[in-house]
Image (spheres, rainbow, N blue to C red):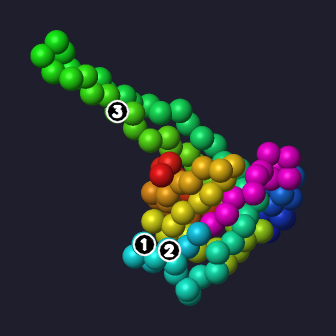
Amino acid sequence: MSPETKTHFNRAIDEIDKRLGQECQLKFLKDGKADTSRNNLTVNAILRVRSPERSTLAGGRKQGWKGSVEGQKATLHISKSRYPDLKIVIGDKVLSEGHWYEVANVNTRDQLRLKVELNRS
């Protein structure tokens, strides 16, 4: 991607984030405890939450009924140009609109955005 094209796309991403983005608090953890080498941060990013995809229901007349629903999954899209030094790892936490999510995967291959896969915790 040429520098001019990248600049154009980054401007477009900034506008999209202004309109559709929301504040998300990033809590950085290491082995389940606060990671002192990284300061917690609030970012403006786009959070897309999907409805649960699976549920199970089992039981019968002689058994008690049991049910479970897979936790909600979400994807957080963070601008690389706005947060160029941001390092997110699996196990970190994200708080947005009163809901906690745990980082399940981080895709850094995109040139313009970090794509962070989240599970609701």
Camera-side residue of 58 and 5:
58
Please report the bounds of the magenta region as a residue range: 16-26
Q: Amino acid at mark 1?
A: Gly
Q: Position of residue 76 (x, y in %)?
A: 62, 53
Q: Is mark 1 in CB contact (under 8 Å) with mark 3?
A: no
SS class of the residue under badge 3? strand
Q: Position of residue 107 (x, y in %)?
A: 53, 60
Q: Which residue is mark 3?
A: 68
Q: Between marks 3 and 2, how big is the CA–CA gap?
A: 28 Å
Residue 52 in sight from this viewpoint: yes
How far from the left and from the top, in percent, is residue 26?
Answer: 63, 66
In the displayed structure, 33 sits above or below 101; it is: below
Foreground: 12 or 22? 22
**Residue annotated with mark 2:** 29
- Whole-Å distance between the Cαs marked 2 and 1? 6 Å
CB atoms of marks 2 and 1 within 8 Å: yes
Q: Quadrant of the N terminus?
A: bottom right
- Judge whether 81 appears above or below 17 on screen: below
Q: CA distance from mark 1 to mark 3?
A: 25 Å
Q: How many marks?
A: 3
Q: Relative to 32, does residue 49 appear above or below in the rendering?
A: above
Horizontal placement of 97 versus 109: left or right? right
Does 20 lie within the magenta span? yes
Crowd band around label 3 with a 10 angstrom C-alpha radius: few (<14), some (14–19), many (20+): few
The residue depicted at 25 percent of the width and 22 percent of the height is: 65
Q: Nearer the viewer, mark 3 or mark 2?
A: 3
Q: Earlier in the sequence, mark 3 or mark 2?
A: 2
Q: Where is residue 61 shown, x and y percent of the image?
A: 16, 12
Q: Which mark is residue 32?
A: 1
- Residue 113: in sight, yes or no? no
Give the secondary structure at mark 1: loop
Other-residue count near label 1 (Cα within 10 Å), few / some / many at <14 / 14–19 / ≥20 = few
